[in-house]
Image: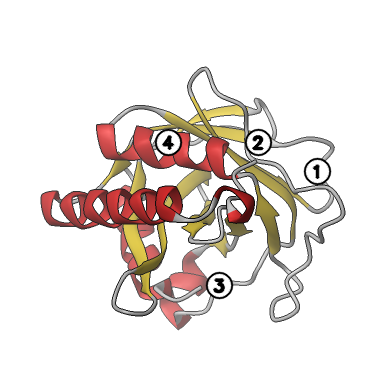
């Protein structure tokens, strides 16, 4: 995923502001997420995909400073399914200095809106990213992902869980996703057009698990 510079700046801003916690002392972590809409246009100029990239930084230690990112995205597409992707990076002084953060392989990830099912790989689909072996990438159901998008748009809390290689379980991050007013308007318009296009499709072509 692009935008590594933004992640570095985000970490630098939180270096002192975010309290550290011992590694793996708990598995539920409050997070202030930064969001950025992802919109893809099809033909004739109608949205083919609407989603959000969600980034957060977890501080593990302050002395010496050590953190790790959670960097995930969800995308609803015009075929009535969704795509989920997640990566993670180790953040330390050398990463900030050199602008290069080593990746931490992610073996599983999911999003969830309050009171809804979490996203999950559709039966028979892969969770491997052919272009990034450290990432998790999968096709998920439309409805749980739509609920996450609606929660982000409403400023409601979401959960984002990531299991990194070598960890026995997911770390579940929870919080709201910060979007600018312009980004929120853009995302909402894209979702409305995408849903309208899905309703116009013949019933036999609709696929909204």
Q: Earlier in the sequence, mark 4 or mark 3?
A: 4
Lateral position of residue 191 relative to residue 106, left or right: left
Q: CA distance from mark 4 to mark 3?
A: 20 Å
Residue 178 higher or lower than 75, as above or below: above
- The quarter of the rendered structure image containing the C terminus is top right
Lateral position of residue 117 relative to residue 99, left or right: right
Q: Quadrant of residue 90?
A: bottom right
Q: Secondary structure at mark 4?
A: loop
Residue 56 percent location from the top left of the image: 44, 49
Tag on residue 167?
A: 1
Q: Quadrant of residue 3?
A: bottom left
Q: Secondary structure at mark 3?
A: loop
Comparing labels 3 and 2, the label whose residue is closer to the camera: 2
The answer to whether residue 62 shows anywhere in this view is no
Tag on residue 31?
A: 4
Task: Single out the residue that lies furthest toward the left.
Answer: 181
State the residue at coordinates (82%, 61%).
126
Structural crowding at the residue carrying mark 3, measured as other residues with C-alpha within 10 Å and reported as few (<14), some (14–19) or many (≥20):
many
Q: Earlier in the sequence, mark 3 or mark 2?
A: 3
Reading the image, the residue beneath label 2 is: 171
């Amino acid at each position: 995923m692009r935008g590594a510079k933004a992640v570095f700046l985000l970490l630098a801003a939180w270096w002192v502001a975010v309290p550290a916690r011992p590694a793996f002392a708990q598995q539920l972590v409050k997070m202030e997420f930064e969001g950025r809409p992802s919109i893809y246009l099809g033909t004739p100029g109608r949205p083919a995909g609407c989603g959000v990239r969600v980034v957060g930084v977890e501080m593990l230690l302050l002395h010496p400073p050590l953190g790790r990112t959670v960097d995930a995205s969800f995308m609803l597409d015009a075929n009535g399914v969704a795509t989920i992707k997640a990566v993670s990076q180790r953040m330390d002084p050398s990463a900030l200095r050199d602008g290069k953060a080593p990746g931490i392989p992610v073996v599983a990830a999911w999003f969830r809106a309050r009171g809804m099912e979490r996203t999950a790989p559709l039966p028979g689909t892969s969770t491997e990213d052919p272009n990034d072996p450290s990432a998790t990438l999968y096709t998920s159901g439309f409805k749980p992902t739509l609920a996450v998008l609606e929660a982000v748009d409403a400023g409601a809390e979401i959960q984002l869980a990531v299991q990194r290689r070598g960890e026995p379980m997911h770390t579940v991050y929870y919080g709201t996703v910060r979007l600018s007013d312009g980004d929120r308007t853009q995302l909402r318009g894209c979702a409305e057009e995408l849903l309208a296009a899905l309703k116009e499709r013949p019933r036999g072509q609709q696929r909204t698990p």
